[in-house]
Image: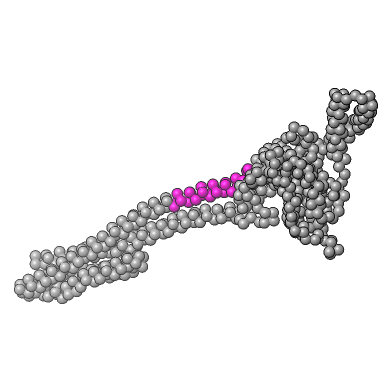
Amino acid sequence: MSARASIPPGVKPSKTLATRILVSFAVTLVAFAVTVGFTVAAQKRAAEDSEELTNGFVPVALKLGRLRAVQSTLASIVDGIPDEKSPQSTRDILRTLDGERRLMFEETRAAMQNELRSLGSDETRQLALVLTGELDAAAAEWAGDRELRDRVFAALDDGDRDVINRDLLALGAMEHAADKRLRALADHVDTSMKNLSAAARAREQRAVVELALLAALTLAVGVGVSIHTRRLLGPLERVTQRAKAVARGDLTPQPTERTDDEIGELATAFERMVASVAKAQNRAVANERLAAIGKMAAHVTHEIRNPLSSIGLNIELLEENLAEAGTSGEPLTLLQAITREVQRLEHLSEEYLRVARLPQPRMESEDLAAKVREIVAFAKPEMDRAGLGLELDVEDDIPLVLFDEGQIRQAILNVLRNAREAMTDGGTIRVYVRAEGMSVVVGVDDEGGGIPEDVRSRIFDPFFSTKGEGTGLGLAITRQIVEAHGGSIAVEPREDKGTTFRLLLPIAPARNSGPHSLPPSRASRAL
């Protein structure tokens, strides 16, 4: 199966699907929490601004307004003292207003010191100290007005115009100065309230914009997490579709995307399973074909062997008779052609019989490397006649292998002859023997024209052949032999040119006999 990535069996994925979905949900939850937290903070700040205005500045402004009203009334009455017909009643009114002013002063100062400082921000608390100082400065303006009023009214009683004019002028200046300071203080409070309201509105507008951005960001995070979750679960849908396709009979393994989670592991395992099922199905089909071939071969061979033997015997007798009669030329040529065709039919029937009667291998723990050396030495004269080189490379200390000598000999010779037939333009066949894991590999590299991919997938099928002659059973028998030994055979293209056949046979279990558990070391050599 060709897969872009796979997770080794038994290795847990680095991040489980549940963890990834939980992380995605946590990201969405954090984004939502940030938005809610910002909303709560904005609402809290708006409530603080509202409380600062309602319970802080508004009471101060109201009390300061009443204080200003009393002070303005006092200043106006003081300005009208010279024209009063009843100085005593004016004196009583001024005393009443003075008491009211002192009471309002204390209330206003308490509002600045308590409500405004306790409810406001740091900036407002600093402002409360400034306002209190300004209020105290205004109170200092009327600090001595009671004594001046007493002197003015005493002068009125005595009719002393000089004292009246002098003290009344000072008293009026004092009251108007206090009124001016209170007016400035009221303007300061009013300006502070406007600034606070403007800042609150600006913060509210900014909060609305920021909240909209956070809401958009949260929505984007939610959409992104949804897409991410869908992407995580996407392979599951593809696995489902693949399962439906497999159920319809599509056993072609498909590449899987690299995902290090359970779904990726499931997809990889599923494609491995599909490949195994396809391989098993192909083997079952091949076995069925071989079984059919066996039955057919047994029947055909039984039916034609005797006639072929009779034909061969009669041809021999005919040749002898013609030779005794001194006949030569075309009759003998025709008889020789008939003989060759009879021999070809006998060879064909023998090959079919090998498929039909391939016995169970008789396994023995043997030195496979030595056997390969023997087979290569046997095949070398044949390769020399074909104008081909034959080289052998054997690793040291090759483990023993359980195999049937006759069957493995037939399998390796089949592969060597297949390589010889592929190299019509000459070259060198390289045979190697090496240990790989728990197997011993016998490889045969040729320098032929190579095998197309569509042909490689069918090269071990019975009766499949790209040559004009032959039954197409040689490689099928070879695979049957190797698989009967518990091994496998593979065909791969070489990097430069040609093809590699690899026969993998499992090594023999370790024996307790000690010295004979491994063959002696042999240096690699070339024939």
Q: Nearer the viewer, residue 20 or 430?
A: 430
Q: Nearer the viewer, residue 476 or 340?
A: 340
Residue 232 magenta-drawn? yes
Q: Which quarter of the picture shows residue 9?
A: bottom right
Q: Nearer the viewer, residue 432 or 82?
A: 432
Q: Which quarter of the picture shows residue 66?
A: bottom left
Q: Residue at x 57, y 47 (%)?
A: 231
Q: Is residue 70 visible?
A: no
Q: Residue at x 34, y 67 (%)?
A: 122
Q: Is residue 296 above or below residue 153?
A: above
Residue 391, horizontal then vertical, whole percent: 73, 50
Q: Residue at x 54, y 56 (%)?
A: 26
Residue 158, horizontal then vertical, whole percent: 7, 75
Residue 339, horizontal then vertical, whole percent: 87, 30
| Image: magenta residue range | 214-240
Q: Is residue 210 visible?
A: yes
Q: Is residue 465 left or right of residue 83?
A: right
Q: Which quarter of the picture shows residue 97?
A: bottom left
